[in-house]
Image (cartoon, rainbow, N blue to C red):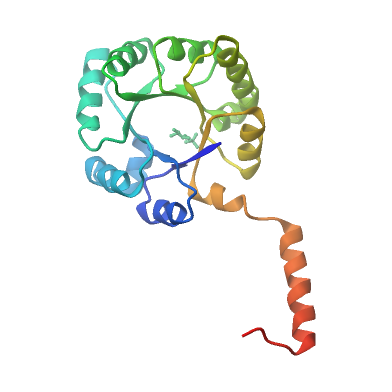
Amino acid sequence: MKFFVDSADVAAIAELNDLGMVDGVTTNPSIILKSGRDITEVTREICALVSGPVSAEVVATQADAMIAEGRKLAEIAENITIKLPLTWDGLKACKTLTDEGRMVNVTLCFSANQALLAAKAGATFISPFIGRLDDINLDGMELIEDIRTIYDNYGFETQILAASIRSANHMKEAALIGADVATAPPNVIKAMANHVLTDKGLAAFLSDWEKTGQTIL
Ligand code: E4P
């Protein structure tokens, strides 16, 4: 499973990238707001750091304006993926922009039918939002499973980008189901390294080592 970082925090992306854990980056208008940076500047910086796809989201709601914004965002760098909302206009823009050979990430997907339409419109990535479904007592992971089944039934090449990931457990479940990509904030990716038995075991080893009176260096 590829890891995308769901953030515009350049330092945090760089730290993970140095460990080989970044296959791409996703941003959205809320993430840009949180960064306090200019969208073009911060996205350009991220694109220079990360060689994989970097999603930058349009804010227009009509297809023609989405297409114009998408083309403008794509000028930032070669690895820009244009992020479009899953609306009828978003699907129209998706078809046009992918026909031009551009990468498109269709976002705000909350149903298998929406994902099916995005694949038909040629989306490079579909972003089902797990956490936001869980927030309203629906099963976000079930949606990932349904999309996996449908895409595999028909050989759609659109990649499933599990989004709105809130926990390390979401990462594991998305990987088990076979999501192509998972995008998560840096703290969630780092939390995947944690285990209480690792901490307990390490504390015991260090305590016993101290009793040996030895040093390694
Ligand atoms: C991904 O592309 C989205 O920007 C992101 O995962 C949304 O996550 P949230 O629901 O935690 O805001």
* Residue 160 coordinates in the image, percent (x, y): 52, 25
Indicate left or right for 211 with 154 as reference: right
Q: Tell me the quarter of the image containing the C terminus.
A: bottom right
Vertical order, 36 against 149 (above or below): below
Residue shown at 41% from the left, 44% from the top: 7
Can you say whether 68 is above or below 32 in the image? above
Judging depth in this view, the residue of 68 and 33 nearest the camera is: 68
* 160 vs 35: above or below: above
Q: Position of residue 41 (x, y in %)?
A: 23, 46
Position of 90 relative to 79 (above/below): above
Asked where in the image residue 179 lies, by quadrant, the reply is top right
Q: Is residue 118 left or right of residue 32?
A: right
Total label count?
0
Q: Residue at x 79, y 86 (%)?
A: 211
Please state, as top left, top right, bottom left or bottom right, where the N terminus lies in the image. Answer: top right
Q: Residue at x 39, y 11 (%)?
A: 121
Residue at position x 65%, y 28% in the image: 177
Front position in the image: 137 or 12 = 12
Left or right of 173, for residue 109: left
Residue 62 showing in the rendered view: no
Picture quarter containing residue 152?
top right
Percent position (x, y) of residue 21? 49, 48
Q: Toward which corner of the image does residue 63 lie, by quadrant?
A: top left
Which residue occupies the extreme bottom position in the image? 213
Q: Position of residue 170 (x, y in %)?
A: 62, 37
Residue 182 visible in the snapshot: yes
